[in-house]
Amino acid sequence: MSRVLRTLPEVEELLPLSPEEKEAFNRVSPIYPFSSTEYYLKLAEKSPAVRKMVLPSLEEIDETIQSAGEDDPLNEERDSKVPKLTHRYPDRVLLITTNYCPVLCRYCMRKRNWRKPIFTISESEVEGALSYIRSNPQVRDVLISGGDPLTLPLELLERILLELKKISHVEVVRIGTRIPVVDPERVLKEELLSLIEKAEKVWVNTHFNHPDEITPEAKEAVKALLKSGAPVNNQTVLLKGVNDSVETLEKLFRNLQRIKVRPYYLFHCDPVKGVMHFSTPITKGLEILKELFKRLSPLAIPYYAVDGPGGYGKVPLLPHRFRVEKGRYLFESFNGRWFEMEDR
Ligand SMILES: *Cc1c(COP(=O)(O)O)cnc(C)c1O
């Protein structure tokens, strides 16, 4: 396990900061704390994009920039059925197992929770969530999220996964984690890998945002997960100054596919207070996507999705243009030529 660093002196032992970065660290971290693994902080030395994702910046507390944001735009705290469980879509539920992450990503949509005490889901909450799932046969997909569920004590993760294995209508169990990116070594633990194999239904959703994060260590972690039988999909967030360009995303998605990770979602950045400086217009996101469709197979292109403020859920967006005229569909193809088809 990579050491977790929280203070300025700890950071400066590994990564010399500029005077501006130091000032930002000192002024921002009392409001939005800093945390990183040693491994991920070392990546920041060579990667300006990683540096931006991990080091505090004064923009986080700039009132003019942040005033348009909300603490919880998606109303996550309201849609909860039983404690720690959210059931928004008919066939799938979201289970929050902890709020702990070893790396605090500066663009985090749950920044509002950073100064709350660290929790791990309790025995009775696990029991409550499991009995809700047992008595709701329409639930076929359980998302285990957090915080980062791969930081849970292994016995707890084991209990959750093996109980879900026994519920026959649960066909898919997804673990949402950034550990392969921020502490890949931790994934290589034999006990964890054999648990994933034994639990049978597990899919892993990773969270790579930039090609610089796909290191030899991260590749090893992904390879081990695939070997344990878990399909690996990736969720990216569109972030200004980090990955909001065709070249960066093309490279990210190609390199993910090369290591057999399927790009699943490219999330539009939610309007969260403290994160607004990472926001890219939807129009720009669609332009980037349109260009990607000219260059890549859809097998390497994620759904670009907005998450409706207020808990409406996710809407995937496609850049393709078409219109309907007198019972005929007119489509624009990848190279800009139009063709038509009758609607029959
Ligand atoms: C994102 C999300 C899911 C999973 O949605 P998919 O589109 O299937 O990945 C489930 N429940 C909630 C509350 C979510 O926010």
Image (cartoon, rainbow, N blue to C red):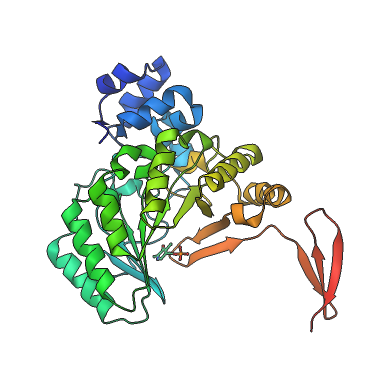
146 left or right, relative to 230: left
**Can see residue 265?**
no
What is the quadrant of residue 178 in the picture? top left
Q: Nearer the viewer, residue 239 or 207?
A: 207
Q: Position of residue 202 (x, y in %)?
A: 35, 62
Residue at the far bottom: name it: 344
What is the quadrant of residue 23 in the picture? top left
Q: Quadrant of ligand 1?
A: bottom left
Q: Nearer the viewer, residue 227 or 6?
A: 227
83 left or right, relative to 204: left
Q: Position of residue 213 (x, y in %)?
A: 46, 36
Instruction: Say which residue appears at 62% left-offset and 49% top-offset.
Output: 285
Q: Position of residue 13 (x, y in %)?
A: 29, 17
53, above or below 222, in the image: above
Q: Nearer the viewer, residue 220 or 10?
A: 220
Q: How many marks?
A: 0
Instruction: Say which residue appears at 68% left-offset and 48% top-offset.
Output: 292
Residue at the far left: name it: 123
327 left or right, relative to 255: right
Query: In what quadrant of the picture does the N terminus appear?
Result: top left
Residue at the far front: name it: 227
185, above or below 310, in the image: above
Instruction: Say which residue appears at 34% left-offset and 44% top-offset.
Output: 179
Query: In what quadrant of the picture does the C terminus appear?
Result: bottom right
**Can see residue 138?**
yes
Q: Position of residue 21 (x, y in %)?
A: 40, 21
